[in-house]
Image (tube, grey):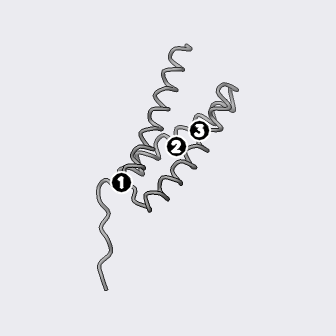
Amino acid sequence: MSAPAEITRGQRFWPIAGAIPFLLSIFLLGVSLNSGALTVFAVVWPLLQVGGYTMTLRLAKGDTSHDLVKTQVILHYVALILLVVLLVRAS
């Protein structure tokens, strides 16, 4: 039998990097449901992440270090940065 495939460092890094904005979006959902602010964004953002990660992993054939997955993760960090800028300017 052949040995199992080794998981590279990049294949470990990108799923963890993608989980951080997803967990923050779930936190934002809880905060917005309590306060009533940014409710539509807080509901839609986790759904967009789930759909986006599903499609990119399907197109990348499960390779988590594929450029499509990296772009998807970076896209959600950009959305997170824009949200922080919006909240800073509003306060």
- Label 3 element class: helix
Asked if the residue at tag 3 contacts the one at tag 1, i.e. Cβ–Cβ closer than 8 Å, the answer is no
Which residue shows up at 47% across the image and 57% down it?
59
Q: Name the side, left or right, on which 3 lies relative to 23.
A: left
Identify the residue under disc 2: 22
Residue neighbourhood size for the residue with mark 1, other residues' Cα within 10 Å, grouped as few (<14), some (14–19), many (≥20): some
Is 33 situated above or below 85?
below
Q: Work out whether residue 34 or residue 4 is closer to the camera in this orientation and state it.
A: 4
Q: Position of residue 88 (x, y in %)?
A: 50, 17
- Label 1 element class: loop
Name the front one of labels 1 and 2: 1
Which residue shows up at 65% across the image and 38% down it?
43
Q: Quadrant of residue 36?
A: top right
Residue neighbourhood size for the residue with mark 2, other residues' Cα within 10 Å, grouped as few (<14), some (14–19), many (≥20): many
Which residue shows up at 30% across the image and 82% down it?
2
Give amino acid for label 3.
Trp
Residue neighbourhood size for the residue with mark 3, other residues' Cα within 10 Å, grouped as few (<14), some (14–19), many (≥20): many
Identify the residue under disc 3: 45
Q: Which circle's residue, 1 or 3, is located before the other in the chain?
A: 3
Q: Which circle's residue, 1 or 2, is located before the other in the chain?
A: 2
Is 69 situated above or below 2?
above
Q: Where's the C terminus, which quadrant?
A: top right
Q: Which mark is residue 43?
A: none
Work out which residue is located at the far front of the displayed protein and give it: 59
Q: Which circle's residue, 2 or 3, is located before the other in the chain?
A: 2
Q: Position of residue 87 (x, y in %)?
A: 54, 20
Give amino acid for label 1.
Ser
Q: Work out whether residue 50 or residue 55 is closer to the camera in this orientation and state it.
A: 55
- Label 2 element class: helix
Q: Where's the N terminus, which quadrant?
A: bottom left
Q: Name the side, left or right, on which 6 lies relative to 61.
A: left
Give amino acid for label 2.
Phe
